């Protein structure tokens, strides 16, 4: 089992920045692929960014160049630096962990591949 807890959400103005973090406890963190997904009201949960156990990174087209995912295996944390925020980035952001699948872009962006999820942290961007 892996327990995940997100932090760092909040209310920011358009153009602002936040740093989301996710702390994992339980099994060996370094062996897991880690992902960030988000869900806006009335919409399906969607892929944002992911980082493989080996450090390869993947991004949704909508956040490329604005968001950066990173991991610190020593601290069992994965972070998402979100810059140049837009109102359409408003959503609950979820951290997820998964293992046992390839690090292809398609797999890394598929929420069904992740077995463990945090409770989410709200990001609200005002215009």
Image (cartoon, helix red, strand yellow):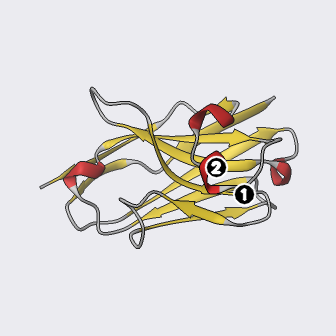
Q: Residues within 10 Å of mark 1 (few under 14, many from 20)?
A: many
Left or right: 102 as drawn, with respect to 14: right
Secondary structure at numbered mark 2: helix
Mark 1 or mark 2, whichever is nearer to me: 2
Screen quadrant of the N terminus: top right
Left or right: 18 as drawn, with respect to 16: right
For the residues labelled 1 and 2, the Cα–Cα distance comes to: 8 Å
Residue 108: mark in rendering: 2
State the image quarter where residue 96 is shown.
top right
Q: Residue 24, how many percent across, how many down? A: 72, 43
Q: Residue furthest left?
A: 127
What residue do we see at 62% from left, 65% from top? 57
Residue 80: mark in rendering: none
Taking depth in this image into account, of 60 and 32 the one nearest to the observer is 60
What residue do we see at 73% from left, 40% from top? 98
Q: Which residue is mark 1?
A: 52
Asked if marks 1 and 2 touch (Cβ < 8 Å), the reply is yes
What residue do we see at 28% from left, 45% from top? 90
Residue 47 vs 3, above or below: the answer is: below
State the image quarter where residue 70 is shown.
bottom right
What residue do we see at 65% from left, 46% from top? 107
State the image quarter where residue 39 is shown.
top left
Screen quadrant of the C terminus: bottom left
Q: Residue 37, how many percent across, how many down? A: 49, 43
């Amino acid at each position: 089992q892996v327990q995940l807890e997100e932090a760092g959400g909040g209310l920011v103005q358009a153009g602002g920045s936040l740093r989301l973090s996710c702390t994992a406890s339980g099994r060996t963190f370094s062996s897991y692929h880690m992902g960030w997904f988000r869900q806006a009201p009335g919409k399906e949960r969607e892929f944002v960014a992911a980082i493989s156990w080996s450090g390869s990174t993947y991004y949704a087209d909508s956040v490329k160049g604005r968001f950066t995912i990173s991991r610190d295996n020593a601290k069992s944390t994965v972070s998402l630096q979100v810059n140049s925020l837009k109102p359409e980035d408003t959503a609950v952001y979820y951290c997820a962990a998964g293992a046992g699948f390839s690090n292809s872009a398609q797999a890394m962006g598929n929420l069904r591949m992740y077995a463990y999820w945090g409770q989410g942290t709200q990001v609200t961007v005002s215009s």
